[in-house]
């Protein structure tokens, strides 16, 4: 399976499809478009079975850009509820895929994540320091131990290091997050966000289902423990000791045992 995607979108007519497609290509969200001028569609709308003639717009892009393509199409599309489908491309000739990637423009997701987190956590404190101090510590640890993760996961861990508290501690929503960041990053952030009625066993078990979430959570915990030792905060340390059994039970998995061992050593 490649990271490239075909986007299937129905449009009212070829002219509208061409206009919208060219906007997406000019903005480097897609590298290529194809238009099927006329298809016959039947669908339910307003409780009525409708028959219509439509146009299909096909776009070739990368999975990381899909959330932004959806948001852009929704901004420009004349339909109230446009059909936008993401179709995975299992393979393709390497020369074409290289060409495709070279004509796409990828946002700096890590910088965007840092900027977003800085704005959302502006008035929040980590002890007596700005909350960004904690996020900077987590980011530093994520990059320090990044060799423990396969390279295809690096971006998701590096963006989640900044975003892992935005759903739980700010008013930012999952839908807003999904419009800006790769779905893998959003999944990690969602797993790291504890719901008020969620037990800690359930919380850690959910995190354990995703290796990137495990990794970021362990870096977050290590940052918290280090901060609680210098200067010493016994109340926080006791809380982390209490939850260390969850860490050992759910997160002490290869290849992250080195981080778990350091946390254990600091808490002993």
Image: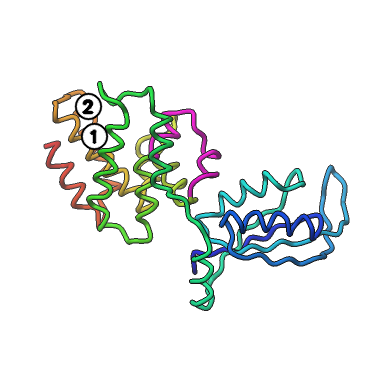
Circle 1 Cα neighbour tier, 10 Å, few/some/many (<14 / 14–19 / ≥20): some
Q: Left or right: 27 with respect to 199?
A: right
Q: Name the residue rendered at 73%, 65% in the picture.
A: 35
Q: Which residue is mark 1?
A: 224
Q: Name the residue rendered at 24%, 34% in the picture.
A: 224
Residue 262's image quarter?
top left
In the rendered image, the residue lying farthest to the front is 26
Q: Which mark is residue 236?
A: 2
Q: CA distance from mark 2 to mark 1?
A: 9 Å
Please say which color scheme the image uses: rainbow
State whether residue 1 is above or below residue 224: below
Q: Position of residue 75 (x, y in %)?
A: 67, 44
Q: Left or right: 24 with respect to 214?
A: right
Q: Position of residue 226 (x, y in %)?
A: 18, 35
- Tell me, yes or no, whether the highlighted magenta stretch contains residue 253: no
Q: Position of residue 231 (x, y in %)?
A: 14, 26
In the rendered image, the quadrant that contains the C terminus is top left
- Tell me, yes or no, whether the highlighted magenta stretch contains residue 172: yes
Q: Left or right: 228 with respect to 189?
A: left
Residue 56's image quarter?
bottom right
| Total numbered labels | 2
Circle 2 Cα neighbour tier, 10 Å, few/some/many (<14 / 14–19 / ≥20): some
What are the residue bounds of the magenta stretch?
Answer: 163-181
State whether residue 9 is above or below residue 141: below
In primary-sequence order, the first of circles 2 and 1 is 1
Q: Left or right: 21 with respect to 142?
A: right
Mark 2 element type:
helix
Q: Name the residue rendered at 39%, 44% in the picture.
A: 111
Q: Which of the pair 187/3 is nearer the observer?
A: 3
- Are the residues flagged by discs 2 and 1 in contact, CB closer than 8 Å? yes
Q: Position of residue 39 (x, y in %)?
A: 82, 64
Mark 1 element type:
helix
């Amino acid at each position: 399976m490649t990271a490239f995607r075909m986007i299937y979108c129905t449009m009212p007519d070829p002219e509208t499809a061409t206009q919208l497609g060219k906007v997406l290509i000019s903005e480097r969200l897609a590298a290529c478009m194809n238009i099927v001028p006329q298809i016959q569609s039947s669908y339910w709308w307003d409780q009525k079975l409708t028959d219509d003639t439509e146009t299909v717009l096909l776009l070739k892009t990368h999975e990381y850009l899909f959330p932004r393509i959806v948001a852009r199409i929704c901004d420009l599309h004349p339909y109230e509820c446009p059909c936008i489908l993401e179709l995975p491309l299992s393979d393709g000739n390497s020369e074409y895929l290289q060409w495709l990637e070279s004509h796409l423009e990828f946002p700096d997701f890590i910088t965007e994540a840092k900027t977003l987190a800085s704005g959302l956590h502006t008035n929040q404190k980590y002890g007596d320091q700005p909350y960004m101090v904690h996020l900077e510590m987590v980011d530093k640890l994520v990059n320090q131990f990044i060799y423990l993760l396969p390279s295809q996961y690096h971006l998701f861990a590096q963006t989640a290091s900044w975003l892992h508290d935005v759903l739980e501690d700010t008013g930012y929503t999952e839908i807003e997050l999904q419009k800006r960041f790769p779905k893998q990053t959003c999944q990690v952030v969602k797993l790291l966000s504890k719901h008020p009625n969620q037990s800690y066993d359930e919380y850690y078990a959910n995190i354990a289902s995703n290796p990137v979430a495990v990794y970021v959570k362990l870096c977050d915990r290590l940052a918290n423990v280090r901060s609680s030792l210098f200067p010493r905060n016994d109340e926080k340390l006791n809380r982390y000791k209490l939850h260390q059994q969850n860490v050992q039970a759910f997160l002490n998995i290869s290849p992250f045992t080195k981080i778990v061992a350091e946390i254990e050593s600091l808490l002993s």
